[in-house]
Image (cartoon, rainbow, N blue to C red):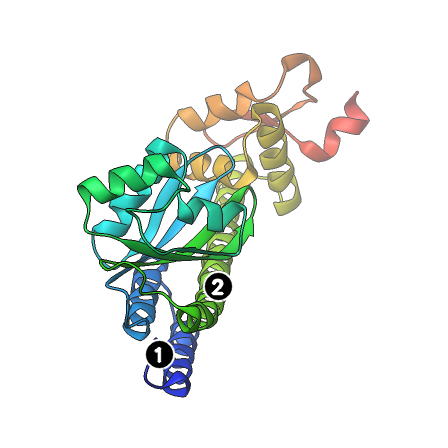
């Protein structure tokens, strides 16, 4: 059997996922490392584990690892453009490689792994896909032919928990990023309102126009303006975003700068 008590394993992993969910702030890298280390502890026939992220453009990156070998094997896959973790991520949900030295698939990968690392068998599971990226949870053993059907069944359970934890961490990151973007946009609006003596709607219209004319995301524009607060670059950045022939009557800024009043542009044409 791959693990002494399946029910104990499921309880332990579920408790870890719940703990991550209850934390006030989740560090993505640290949380994933902690999770992978926990999962490896339940796959007794493996000595190493990691999570591989791949993109449709061919990028291969190690998101989490219990030691250096998962990253080494991912680097080999990246250079050789083949391997079990890539196959699990893009073509199959589960890949079992029983013996590196006799495997006929991914021959370039297997040859280099056998020559440069002690890894002799691999078990890989797809855990997430989306936005041109996909990920795999991988277990590695220094012995051949150690992953049996029980290991695959156990790995599927572990991969499900890993996928749940990954989506939870990503959700937390996205939520915090959205809050941060909202805050910086609010700061930029307040700065424009004070500098140009305009209301919140007009300030937001200025930010939108600057975002459109510079082809830059609104949150990034706001961050740039906040970073330029108190400098002459602010007036220049705003003026450069608007063509003179499209400006309505200028709105006098405090300190002598001018900027268009967004609500007047329809009336003044």
Please tell me which residue is depicted at 53% across the width and 19% down the height of the picture. Answer: 240
At which x and y percent is residue 221? 50, 35
Q: 243 or 214: which is nearer to us?
A: 214
Please tell me which residue is depicted at 37% across the width and 76% down the height of the picture. Answer: 16
**Can see residue 4?**
yes
State whether residue 66 is above or below residue 81. Answer: below
State whether residue 49 is above or below residue 205. Answer: below
- Tag 2 residue: 163
State whether residue 268 is above or below residue 59. Answer: above
Label 2 Cα neighbours within 10 Å, binned few <14 / some 14-19 / many ≥20: some
Q: 208 or 247: which is nearer to us?
A: 208
Q: Quadrant of the N terminus?
A: bottom left
- Tag 1 residue: 1
At which x and y percent is residue 155? 42, 68
At which x and y percent is residue 122? 34, 55
Which residue is most to the front? 102
| Earlier-in-chain disc, 2 versus 1 | 1
Q: Quadrant of the C terminus?
A: top right
């Amino acid at each position: 059997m791959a693990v002494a008590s399946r029910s104990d394993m499921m309880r332990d992993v579920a408790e870890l996922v719940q703990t991550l969910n209850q934390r006030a702030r989740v560090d993505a890298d640290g949380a994933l490392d902690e999770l992978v280390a926990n999962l490896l502890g339940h796959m007794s026939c493996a000595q190493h584990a990691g999570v591989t992220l791949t993109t449709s453009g061919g990028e291969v990156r190690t998101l989490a690892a219990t030691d250096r070998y998962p990253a080494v094997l991912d680097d080999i896959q990246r250079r050789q453009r083949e391997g079990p973790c890539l196959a699990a991520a893009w073509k199959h949900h589960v890949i079992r490689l029983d013996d590196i030295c006799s495997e006929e698939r991914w021959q370039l990968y297997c040859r280099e792994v056998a020559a440069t690392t002690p890894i002799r068998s691999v078990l890989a599971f797809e855990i997430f896909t989306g936005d041109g990226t996909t990920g795999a949870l991988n277990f590695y053993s220094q012995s051949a032919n150690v992953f049996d059907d029980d290991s695959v069944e156990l790995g599927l359970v572990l991969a499900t928990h890993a996928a749940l934890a990954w989506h939870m961490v990503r959700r937390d990151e996205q939520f915090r990023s959205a809050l941060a973007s909202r805050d910086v946009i609010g700061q930029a609006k307040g700065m424009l309102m004070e500098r140009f003596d305009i209301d919140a709607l007009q300030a937001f219209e200025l930010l939108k126009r600057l975002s459109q004319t510079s082809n830059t995301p609104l949150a990034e524009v706001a961050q740039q303006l906040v970073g330029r607060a108190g400098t002459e670059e602010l007036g220049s950045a705003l003026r450069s975003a608007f063509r003179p022939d499209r400006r309505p009557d200028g709105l006098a800024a405090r300190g002598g700068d001018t900027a268009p009043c967004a609500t007047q542009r329809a009336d003044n044409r």
